[in-house]
Amino acid sequence: MEHMKNSFKNLTSRPDFNDRFNDLKNQVLNHPEIKAFITNHASEIEDGMVERSLGKLFEFMNQSKNCEQCPTLSECKNLLEGYHPRLVIQGRIIDLQYDKCPTKEAHDERKKHESLIKSMYIPKDILAAQFDQIDVEMDEASRFKAISLAQDFVEQYNNGKRPKGIYLYGSFGVGKTYILGAIANELAAHKISSMLVYVPEFMRELKGSFQNSSLDEKLDVVKKIPVLMLDDIGAESMSSWMRDDILGTILQFRMLENLPTFFSSNFNLKQLQHHLAFSQRGEEEPVKAARIMERIKHMAIPIELIGRNRRG
Ligand code: ADP
Ligand code: MG
């Protein structure tokens, strides 16, 4: 804007003002979009309107439209990053209206999408997983089944139901976490927020500082997030305190509030029960483990994911 004003100011003080002015006016009037606008609005354009609007038209000419001159948002060359002009008739002049450009629209949409997926200690590539890009081999019936169950979940949730989550189990590297990531993305596309938590790291952090207030906050988010995904449950070494007071409390809350919860594990339900029954000190607490398992079974449908290790 400054730049343009200056060029007009310089212009008026120079002796060849008239020539330069007519030259600019010709440039403006020959600009294809301006020309088309004037033709299309011929009946509304009064005498002198174009001359009064030359400054605005000049500005229009010099701004990028539809991102044609801006490769990315941060390289946007316009006056206001992410906004492009449109010609409008405003009283006695042709004025400009600035709207969000397509790149900015897409950027804001993506930000909104990302803000719907919260995660703790989950790799970035997993958070980009999409149902329609999951590579499924012909003989992988279990992957088909898991994906179709996951898609049913999103559809039902979107229709206001609160279906059960999934307990996805299977060996290392078969793509359990990847499917959870795809569910989170599909939910976000329907404006449903979810959270993926890598359980071993979460527990490690809790152990270090159970009176840290930021962890209380984290715990609160985990309890209340509309859809929770507990990734790799069973891979942690869990103390009785973590099992009963952390995991037990989270699951109890979510079960009572009817908040869907997903799990992934290398263990099937029976193996997980065994894992939870033995505390780090080697004491056996089968009743407490059974209580947790009751909640998990109540909240999620178990599915085994079978396939090759896709890591490395
Ligand atoms: P798991 O959680 O079962 O141990 P992951 O979900 O972490 O396995 O998957 C292991 C690796 O393989 C990850 O890097 C993931 O991005 C990739 N991956 C998993 N499933 C697929 C798939 N169906 N198509 C393509 N890549 C996949
Ligand atoms: Mg995993």
Image (cartoon, rainbow, N blue to C red):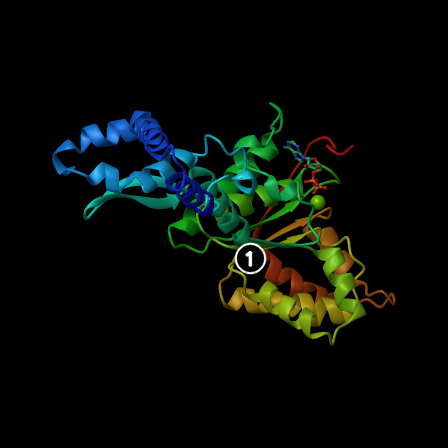
Please provide percent x and percent y for residue 224.
54, 65
Mark 1 lies on residue = 299
Can see residue 103?
yes
Please provide percent x and percent y for residue 153.
48, 47
Q: Nearer the viewer, residue 221 or 6?
A: 6
Can see residue 285?
no
Q: In the rendered picture of this protein, how many numbered marks are placed on residues?
A: 1
Please provide percent x and percent y for residue 96.
31, 44
The image quadrant that residue 5 belongs to is: top left
Query: Residue drawn 71% across and 51% down?
Result: 232
Q: Is residue 254 above or below residue 108?
A: below
Q: Where ligand 1 lies, by image quadrant?
A: top right
Query: Could you tell me the amino acid type at mark 1?
Result: Met
Q: Nearer the viewer, residue 32 or 58?
A: 58
Q: Nearer the viewer, residue 293 or 111?
A: 111
Q: Is residue 139 above or below residue 215?
A: above
Please provide percent x and percent y for residue 243.
72, 66
Is 309 on the left-hand or right-hand side of 294? right
Seen from this angle, which residue lies furthest bottom? Answer: 211
Seen from this angle, which residue lies furthest right? Answer: 281
> Split into 4 quadrants, where in the image is the C terminus?
top right
Q: Residues within 10 Å of mark 1 (few under 14, many from 20)?
A: many
Query: Residue drawn 75% across and 56% down?
Result: 200
Seen from this angle, which residue lies furthest front? Answer: 15
Is 38 on the left-hand or right-hand side of 118? left
Seen from this angle, which residue lies furthest top? Answer: 138
Query: Residue drawn 64% across and 40% down?
Result: 178
Q: Nearer the viewer, residue 58 or 169?
A: 58
Q: Is residue 42 above or below residue 159?
A: above
Mark 1 lies on a secondary structure that is helix
Is 110 on the left-hand or right-hand side of 206? left
